[in-house]
Amino acid sequence: MDAVDLSIFASRLDAVSDEMGAVLQRAAFSPNIRDRLDFSCAIFDARGQLCAQAAHIPVHLGSMAYAMADIVRQIDWQPGDMVIVNDPYLGGTHLPDVTVIAPLFVADELLAFVANRAHHADIGAESPGSMPISGSLEEEGLVLAPTKLVRAGQLDSPFLENILRQVRSGTTGRGDFAAQMSANRAGLARLAERVEALGPTAFTRGLVELNEYAERLASEALRVIPDGEYRFVDYLDDDGLGHTDLAIAVTLQVHNGSVTVDFADTALQTPGNVNCPLSVAAAAVYYVFRCLMPPQTPACAGSFRPIKLEAPEGCLVNARRPAAVAAGNVETSSRIVDVVMGALAEALPQRIPAASHGSMNNLAMGYAGGHAGEPGTPGWDYYETIGGGMGAGRHGGGLSGIQTHMTNTRNTPLEVLESNYPLRLRRYALRTDSGGAGARRGGDGLIREFEFLAPASVTLLTERRTHAPWGLAGGEPGQPGVNRLNGDPLPGKVRLDVKAGDVLSIETPGGGGFGKPAASDEGRVTRDEEKH
């Protein structure tokens, strides 16, 4: 293909991924998928190499790009099949993220795959929201190895019913699984149209050329990084089971447009659930370097080929089964971004921003029965992530109250929240001046305050409550986050039972500042003053 045809080819593949996402959102039952958009869609070639993706969630997409080749090799694919998987050690991220994969056959030839990954607020864990303070993978819910959910176009109803019996929100779960299958059917239909228009040979060659083009762009972008070795270390607050200050260390070895990312000095895996499989670590690493590439770089496997990942088996970012991983996907991935960016800041001091809020501020809650309320109370599950402050950079201050880096979800609108669950949102506001001071100020975090209208069980998995988001070039750190119940401080990771009338307040961290502040600590410039 010439340059114009290749660009059109890439855009049409991206459009297929976008349409899959639109179908999934509109068909889903749960606010988690329908309103928060906690899902991702992508296209892969016949070997499982990423070829296109929608602009969805980096931790989903990068991990699928890393692991899909291993998944597709395990299956004897037939036309009309769909495979479901959530096992973090077989290509998943954490158990709530359920992936559904479908092959594209044309004239009995396997040409490509479509896949989507969506977060299910209930995947069968004991605690509502299926994000427990866990010590092993089995405590986190139902583990699904790659298994055919649809065989030759026929749904395996007994298998699906077995899944739904093990979750509390069976009706919602059924609807969300149906939405995921529908998204794949839409993707297959549109992808088949592309093959029909081009012919199978030209289509397959186009996928190869797209990845080769992405590899060239990626290598050129990475040549901007001066050759050398760069190190950085940062820490997770804790693992929820009493182990604190867990180091994530990285060494970048840069040479002529290629990078080796080595986590050799990272802490060993821990009893708590902040461990992550290597696919999640890869997603965080890919994300950072993808941000250095030009906007026209195709989002495909070729763009990651110049990046090599090394992490000792059994460390925090390459855990061994059956280590718990629920928070590794959401919290540890965020810290991996911080350490890779911290190392790059030494090499590219004018291009790398200060640390953002560094936590997805996970809140899972609901009613599980028994210990958390009165008999006969209907069960419910709810999960959300909460934004914070973005780190400032050379060219501008950080944005306030948004998701950053490894997640790209929306908030749950208060109307949706209050109409679906026994909750009242008492306050939703920016956390004024929580961003770090500097020549460019860090963005402010959020305050989100919930009143419970019925008894519930709550789990918080949050970070940056002890180790503040760092500033750069003399900028100050952002303010750490704070969790409170009825005004009393809570740990960053905690499970608790609440009663009607209790109030949970979550104040998320601000982003780090960039450059030396224009005012001292005693006369710190406020954001309103900065505007003038």
Image: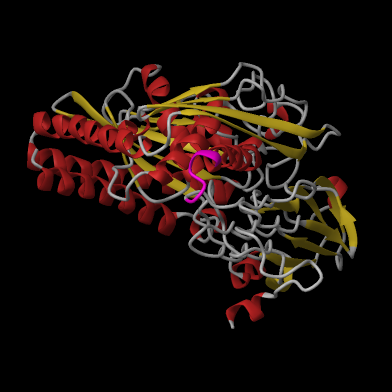
Task: Give the image quarter of residue 66.
Answer: top left
Q: In the image, 122: left or right of 460?
A: left
- Residue occupying the point 24% across, 45% down: 13
Q: Position of residue 348 (x, y in %)?
A: 48, 43
Q: Main secondary structure of the magenta part?
A: loop
Residue 373 visible? The answer is no
Decide which of 406, 176 is in the foreground and name it. 406
| Labels in figure, total | 0
Task: Using the image, determine if residue 468 lies above or below residue 225.
Answer: below
- Residue occupying the point 65% across, 42% down: 331
Decide which of 495, 351 is in the foreground and name it. 351
Question: In which quadrant of the rendered image does the C terminus lie?
Answer: bottom right
Question: In which quadrant of the rendered image does the N terminus lie?
Answer: top left
Residue interval drawn in magenta: 346-350
Decide which of 484, 501 is in the foreground and name it. 484
Q: In the image, 480: left or right of 496?
A: left
Residue 531 visible? The answer is yes
Q: Position of residue 509 (x, y in %)?
A: 70, 57
Decide which of 438, 356 is in the foreground and name it. 438
Examine the structure image and report whether residue 193 is included in the region drawn in magenta.
Answer: no
Task: Using the image, determine if residue 331 lies above or below residue 315.
Answer: below
Q: Position of residue 186 (x, y in %)?
A: 29, 47
Q: Position of residue 412 (x, y in %)?
A: 59, 63
Of all residues, the one furthest to the bottom in this rendering is 532
- Residue occupying the point 9% across, 33% down: 202
